[in-house]
Amino acid sequence: MTAASPGPDIRAAIAALEAEIAGACARAARPAGEVAVVAVTKGHPAERARDALAAGLADLGESRAQELAPKARALAAERPGPGEAPRWHFIGHLQRNKVREVVPLISCLHSLDSQRLLRAIEREHGRLRESRGGAASPLPCYLQVNVAGDPAKHGVAPGELEPLLEAALASEAVVVLGLMTVAPEGDPESARPHFRALARLAREHGLTGLSMGMTDDYRVAVEEGATLVRIGRALLGERATGAG
Ligand SMILES: *Cc1c(COP(=O)(O)O)cnc(C)c1O
């Protein structure tokens, strides 16, 4: 597929997704239009990310540094104008030794999950500030919570959220947008208590952003209050490579 044909399949998928999100908002008596979509391009080549952008998806998600960096560079090289650039969201576990590579490329981190990672982001923020002559905006972040206590998932335990949140709120290097979780695999209805628990935690801490819901469970997530869903397969089809 070329840049000249931005993919009618993606446009149709966006329309279908928006209708589903509107339906879920209606079922939950939520106002329509308060759910943002991040299109997850992991496992797809840079051309597919370019098609997503051309179809109107400006927020793109990646979960691995080694996949994000070449795609972000490829699209940046073609689209130097700031208005046309995608906003990259990092949605996977961020290793501290990848902070220097990833942070300058992204608009939002969905997986802040430890004070050690926060400290590494602060060091990178300081370095960027110096190299940019005193100006570096803080990185918008979601704190990832492992509400289900799933050993296969990253995120702080709900009981450990408080100290991490306090440290992040006090930090000049990040802005806390809210909480994020990845529900265990399984039938979407089984994710509901986890989404509900994340929404309750956010409320208790005065946070409004909720990054929750993927292709299989986003309807339930929106019913439970998601303000942002991270959607790969429902927008871009099956992944060519098994990106985690
Ligand atoms: C891959 C991934 C998604 C998107 O998954 P789909 O099932 O393709 O929608 C969302 N969030 C995270 C953290 C992911 O790793």
Image (cartoon, rainbow, N blue to C red):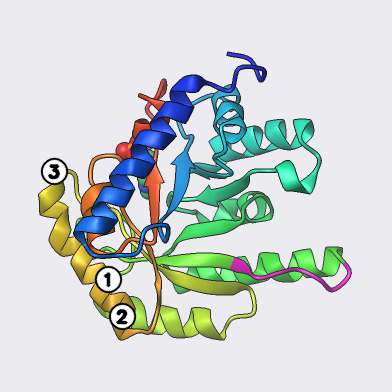
- Which residue ends up furthest to the right in the rendered image? 133
- Tag shown at residue 181: none
Expressed as whole percent of the image width and height from the top left, the position of residue 179 reads 38, 68
Question: Is 32 on the left or on the right of 142, as rendered?
Answer: left
- The reply to whether discs 1 and 2 touch (Cβ–Cβ < 8 Å) is yes
Q: Which residues are magenta?
A: 133-139
Ligand 1 under 8 Å from disc 3 Cβ:
no
Image quadrant for the N terminus?
A: top right
Residue placed most toward the observer, 197 or 222: 222
Question: Which residue is the site of mark 1?
Answer: 199
Residue 145 appears anywhere in the view: yes
Ligand 1 under 8 Å from disc 1 Cβ:
no
Mark toward the start of the polypeptide (3 vs 2)? 3
Q: Is residue 55 above or below residue 176?
A: above
Count residues near mark 1 (Cα–Cα under 10 Å), then give few for <14, some for 14-19, many for 20+. Answer: many
Residue 231 found in image quarter: top left
Residue placed most toward the observer, 95 or 73: 73
Q: Main secondary structure of the magenta part?
A: loop
Expressed as whole percent of the image width and height from the top left, the position of residue 234 reads 34, 33
Image quadrant for the C terminus?
A: top left
- Tag shown at residue 203: 2
Q: Disc 2 residue type?
A: Arg
- Tag shown at residue 186: 3
Question: Is 132 on the left or on the right of 40, as rendered?
Answer: right
Nearer the viewer's eye, disc 1 or disc 3? Answer: 1
Rounded to the nearest angstrom, the CA distance separating label 1 from label 3 is 20 Å
Q: Is residue 116 above or below residue 150?
A: below
Q: Is residue 138 magenta?
A: yes
Count residues near mark 2 (Cα–Cα under 10 Å), then give few for <14, some for 14-19, many for 20+. Answer: few
Q: Disc 1 residue type?
A: Ala
Q: How many marks?
A: 3
